[in-house]
Amino acid sequence: MISRGKNIRQVFQRYLSTCFSLRNKMVDVNIAAMRIDYTLSEQLDTDNLPVKDPISLFEIWFTEAKNCERIEEPNAMTLATGTRSGIPSARIVLLKGFDKRGFMFYTNYQSRKGKELVSNNTRL
């Protein structure tokens, strides 16, 4: 994880120095084994949620994420859109707010995502 205030080049160079030997040969790294198991031992019990309203539930989860020191940008989210012909695309945007009407984020109306949202009659 990149700490705030660190130069990205310094962080990347430090990362590379741990991955390569002095002769620029890759250190034996099993990339396929590099993963975190996100499997839940049980399914989400929707009958025992603290609230039933999905926006209120998101507010609880978002507050927990904001208070977690390991999460540097809790408002980062993935927005997926598609063309009218059904070709999907996804990108990271920043959540700017939410209320009972839904989620708000910033986008440039002239960007690809902005045009895709408008062309698919998405409420903006």
Image: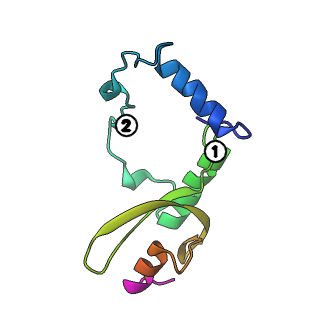
User: What secondary structure is marked by label 2?
Assistant: loop
Q: CA distance from mark 1 to mark 2?
A: 20 Å
- Rendered residue at 55%/26% (across/down): 15
Amino acid tagged 1: Glu
How many neighbours does mark 1 have within 10 angstroms: few (below 14), some (14-19), or many (20 or more)? some
Residue indicated by mark 1: 72
Residue 86 magenta: no
The colour scheme is rainbow
Residue indicated by mark 2: 38
Amino acid tagged 2: Tyr
- Rendered residue at 51%/54% (across/down): 50
Q: Position of residue 18 (x, y in %)?
A: 52, 19
Left or right of residue 71: residue 46:
left
- Above or below: residue 112 compared with residue 123: above
| In front of the other: 45 or 109 | 109
Q: Position of residue 77 (x, y in %)?
A: 51, 58
Magenta residues span 118-124
- Above or below: residue 104 compared with residue 56: below
Q: Are marks 1 and 2 in contact (CB under 8 Å)?
A: no
* Circle 1 or circle 2, nearest the eye: 1
Left or right of residue 61: residue 43:
left
- Rendered residue at 58%/59% (across/down): 59
Residue 122 magenta: yes
The answer to whether residue 97 of the structure is visible from this angle is yes
| In front of the other: 24 or 26 | 24
User: What secondary structure is marked by label 1?
Assistant: loop
Q: Position of residue 119 (x, y in %)?
A: 39, 85
